[in-house]
Every structure is written in structure tokens, then in C-alpha cells.
């Protein structure tokens, strides 16, 4: 029987997000493909250093112990690589070395593998390749660029903390477009109050959040049956919205059947300060300006979606 991906949280991750490939990339750029191949062959049994998304992926996969059946995991992570199968062998051996539960992979020599996101029911693709991520977003696929950022990983804590910006990440950029058109925060707030009961259209990571929420429901069921169980998965919203624009955001989440554990409506307060205390294992934002400082304290992912990013792309 075929292995069904429809009812799972499926993540696609590039080796550039999972591991630190700086040494390998330096060899490729300096010496070319032939010597790069020899370098990877010589180092086949030397595990690659952990990358920015490593802890997030490992902790996410650890939640599979919540499934009542070992052959029916809640989470599937698939490697999507620009390497060919031969040079990608070191990546697979590194995954095995670290005991990461990833067995499925796609290798496409020199080509972006993001076109396979819909075929694999992937609700989040993480890559260190900015061009691949931007191409995926243009095709309305859920992708994020893993930035060079701080790593948060505390072995004593078995939990997983995920933080999201709201507009342009979970929701579409309708409200940001209103703000950009008027450059007036009061116009933005008036629009949100008028539409408080009208849910936003989904943004790039809405389905990812919905899938994460389904795992939280499994945790709640576990807690009901085992009162001593402590929830491991925690979701936070960290947004520049404040009152009264917060109401539409919360109503939107409810309409999707999801709720955040925490919500920070910061109204212009620098996100870095809150994130430094919250210490999520991954943070998603569409605004590169916010991420410049956030990446100093937490693993940060840029979602290049919406009007702000389109303007930046045009200016570039």
C-alpha cells in the first residue's frame, strides 16, 4: 500500500537549512564541481555540522512518539537537495549519524527542487537558497529562507517553541497593502476595526499552522488520558499589531480552528527584545527589517511574500 502524506504535517528541508555547508560551498566555489565531489567523498563519514534549522527539525520529529502507531507518524520531513544523489550521500550519512528520523529525499543536480512541494503535500519548505525560496513563493508555495542567525537549543528542554509574525506569514498581505497605500497607521487600524469579524485570507504558512495545531490537539488528548503529561509544543504570535487591530487577527485564527498559546501585540516595540526572552526554536517573519535584529537572538526565517517584498525585489 502506498505511503499516504495527506494527513500528516510534511516539511521539506534543504541541506543548506539542515546543516552548515559553508566549508563545502567554499570548496565548490573555489575549486569547481570535480574537486567538490572528491572533497565530499573524502569526508563521506565526517558528519556535517548542524545548521540553523537542525534543532527545529529534530524537535519536530520527536513529536512522532505521540502517534499510537509507529508506522503512522504525525510528522514527515523530506530532504530536498540541489546535490546529485552521489554528492548528497554525505548529507544522508549525517542525518543517520545524528539519529534524525528522515529517510526520504529528492536530489536534483543543480536544480531547485521546490516544484515538488505540492506533489509531496509539503506545508513548509525551508532552504538557505534565497532564489529557490523566492521562486517557490512566486508560485504560491509555502517556503522560507533560513537566515544566518543565532541557534537556540537547550538539551534539558524537550519542547518545541515556534513563533510567527501574522501579516504576510499566516495571513495574506491585505492589511499591509492598506498601510502601504496610506502610510497611516490610523487608516490601517480603522480598516481592521471595520473588518474585525471578516477573517483574513490565508498567507503562505497558514496550512503549516493548521497542521501544527492538529498535533497540539493530539497532545491535549494525551494530557486528558495522562494528567501528568506536559505539553511540548508551543505556538506564539509576535506581531507589530496592537489594539484595536488585534481583534481581527484573533478572529482569523479562530475561523481557521487554531489558537496560539501566546500572543504579543507589540505596536512597534522591537521584536528582538521579546524574542530574546521567548527563545523560540524558529521564528517566521515577512519583514527583513524585523529579521535583521531578530536573527541576532533566535533562528530566523524570512518569508518573502507580499507587497513589501515585491517592492524590495523591484527596487533591487
Image (cartoon, rainbow, N blue to C red):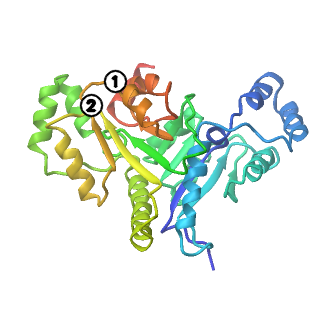
163 with respect to 111 (left or right) = left
Q: Residue furthest front?
A: 228
Which sits in the foreground, 135 or 129? 129
Q: Residue furthest top?
A: 315
- Residue placed under numbered mark 2 in the picture: 266
Q: Quadrant of residue 218?
A: bottom left
The x and y percentages for residue 280 are: 46, 40
Q: Residue furthest bottom?
A: 1
Which sits in the foreground, 145 or 222? 222
Q: Residue 270, labelled with which disc?
A: 1
Q: Secondary structure at mark 1?
A: loop
The x and y percentages for residue 251 are: 20, 51
| Residue at the image point whose x is 54% and y is 31% from the top | 147
Q: Is residue 295 above or below residue 108?
A: above
97 with respect to 223 (left or right) = right
What is the C-alpha distance between the residues marked 2 and 1?
8 Å
The x and y percentages for residue 47 are: 79, 42
| Residue at the image point whose x is 82% and y is 48% from the top | 86
| Residue at the image point whose x is 10% and y is 40% from the top | 193
Q: Residue 169, labelled with which disc?
A: none
Q: Quadrant of residue 154?
A: top right
Q: Secondary structure at mark 2?
A: loop
Residue 200 visible, this orientation = yes
Q: CB under 8 Å between callouts 2 and 1?
A: yes
The x and y percentages for residue 97 are: 77, 50
User: Counting other residues with Cα less than 10 Å from the Cα at mark 1, is it few (<14), some (14-19), or many (20 or more)?
Assistant: some
Amino acid at each position: 500500500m502506498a505511503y499516504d502524506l495527506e494527513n500528516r504535517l510534511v516539511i521539506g528541508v534543504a541541506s543548506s537549512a539542515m546543516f552548515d555547508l559553508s566549508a563545502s560551498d567554499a570548496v565548490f566555489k573555489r575549486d569547481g564541481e570535480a574537486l567538490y565531489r572528491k572533497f565530499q567523498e573524502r569526508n563521506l563519514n565526517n558528519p556535517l555540522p548542524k545548521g540553523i534549522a537542525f534543532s527545529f527539525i529534530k524537535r519536530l520529529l520527536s513529536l512522532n512518539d505521540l502517534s499510537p502507531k509507529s508506522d503512522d507518524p504525525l510528522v514527515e520531513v523530506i530532504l530536498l537537495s540541489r546535490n546529485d544523489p552521489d554528492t548528497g550521500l554525505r548529507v544522508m550519512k549525517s542525518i543517520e549519524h545524528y539519529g534524525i528520523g528522515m529517510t526520504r529525499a529528492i536530489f536534483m543536480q543543480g536544480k531547485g527542487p521546490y516544484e515538488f512541494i505540492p506533489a509531496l503535500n509539503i506545508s513548509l519548505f525551508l532552504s538557505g537558497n534565497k532564489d529557490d525560496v523566492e521562486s517557490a513563493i512566486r508560485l504560491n508555495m509555502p517556503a522560507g529562507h533560513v537566515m544566518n542567525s543565532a541557534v537556540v537549543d537547550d538539551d534539558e528542554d524537550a519542547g518545541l517553541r515556534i513563533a510567527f509574525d501574522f501579516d504576510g506569514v499566516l495571513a495574506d498581505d491585505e492589511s499591509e497593502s492598506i498601510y502601504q497605500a496610506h502610510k497611516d497607521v490610523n487608516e490601517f487600524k480603522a480598516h481592521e476595526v471595520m473588518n474585525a469579524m471578516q477573517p483574513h485570507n490565508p498567507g503562505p504558512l497558514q496550512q503549516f499552522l493548521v497542521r501544527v495545531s492538529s498535533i497540539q490537539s493530539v497532545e491535549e488528548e494525551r494530557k486528558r488520558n495522562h494528567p501528568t503529561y506536559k505539553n511540548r509544543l508551543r505556538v506564539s504570535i509576535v506581531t507589530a499589531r496592537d489594539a484595536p487591530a488585534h481583534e481581527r487577527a484573533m478572529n482569523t485564527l479562530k475561523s481557521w480552528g487554531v489558537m496560539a498559546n501566546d500572543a504579543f501585540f507589540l505596536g512597534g516595540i522591537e521584536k528582538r527584545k521579546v524574542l530574546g526572552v521567548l527563545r523560540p526554536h524558529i521564528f517566521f517573519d515577512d519583514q527583513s527589517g524585523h529579521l535583521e535584529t531578530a536573527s541576532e537572538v533566535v533562528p530566523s526565517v524570512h518569508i518573502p511574500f507580499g507587497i513589501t517584498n515585491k517592492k524590495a525585489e523591484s527596487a533591487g
